[in-house]
Image: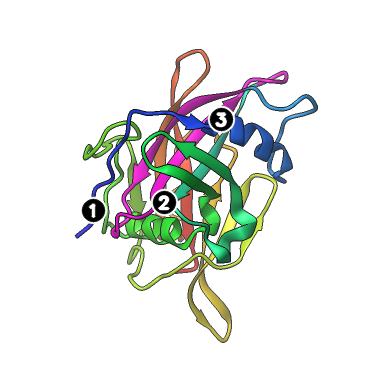
Amino acid sequence: MSIMAVIHRTTMSPGKLELLAGWLPLRPWYRGGTGGPQLSKAGGFRLDDPEGEVGIEFMVVTDSRGDEPVTYLVPLTYRGEPLAEAGEGLIGTSEHGVLGRRWIYDGAHDPVLVEQLLALLAGRTTAQDQNASDAPDPTVEVRTEGAGVPAGLTGAGTVTDTADASLVAVGPVTREGPASALTVHRVLRPGPAAAGDGVPGRVLAGWTDPDGTPLHGLFAHLTGA
């Protein structure tokens, strides 16, 4: 049985947007120019860690610096201790007003987030509201095709960044390589997901444009299952 995360109304120092402002420009999928990003929170959702140890948040931020705003998906994990095998995914540390020091990771590198995202795609867990405890988020949509997403996939394996996404190898690993690839869409674009192309599972969710317009689009999908 999954342990529900508790949302604490407290402070973090440095804050999440402050940490991301220094980290985003180093990503190959960052679209901004010089001068650093001007970030605002635009949406997202959470997943629960069944062990109750790791905070999992799919955070959407919009960078308003530049000619056109760009919206990014940054899956985050919050840990009470460093995760050795995910060192290259470390975004930074922050002092949480209730929980103390937290190590904050790009969740594509954290096996707990990847496995819970696979569980969401397979229908074994439910997306939670970003800002409330024990409150499912009905706006997060999971679409499956064919046989759907099989059980037994694990992660996170090798992470490969492209110009607009992160590709995460997920197992089990065979002689031919990883069984599947989980694509985390970093640069978000509104619109429906294509159907009938053999993708066994997709996650779609919403965010808000800087002018207040609600938008909806593809956050992640699985291939090769």
Q: Nearer the viewer, residue 32 or 79?
A: 79
| Residue 86 image position (x, y, % from top left) | 57, 61
> Relative to 133, is 56 above or below?
below
Q: Main secondary structure of the magenta part?
A: strand
Q: Which residue is mark 2?
A: 202
Which residue lies at the image location 36% right of the left edge and 64% below the top edge? 149
Mark 1 neighbour density, 10 Å: few (under 14) some (14–19) many (20 or more): few
| Circles 2 and 3: CB atoms closer than 8 Å | no
Q: Identify which amino acid the numbered label 3 is placed on.
A: Leu
Give the alpha-carbon distance from disc 2 to disc 3, as whole Å: 27 Å
| Circles 2 and 1: CB atoms closer than 8 Å | no
Q: Which residues are magenta?
A: 39-68
Question: Mark on residue 3?
Answer: 1
Task: Residue 190: tell me if it is visible.
Answer: no
Q: Can you say which quadrant of the picture contains the C terminus?
A: bottom left
| Residue 52 image position (x, y, % from top left) | 30, 54
| Residue 24 image position (x, y, % from top left) | 66, 38
Which residue lies at the image location 48% right of the left edge and 26% below the top edge? 42
Say what secondary structure mark 3 lies in.
helix
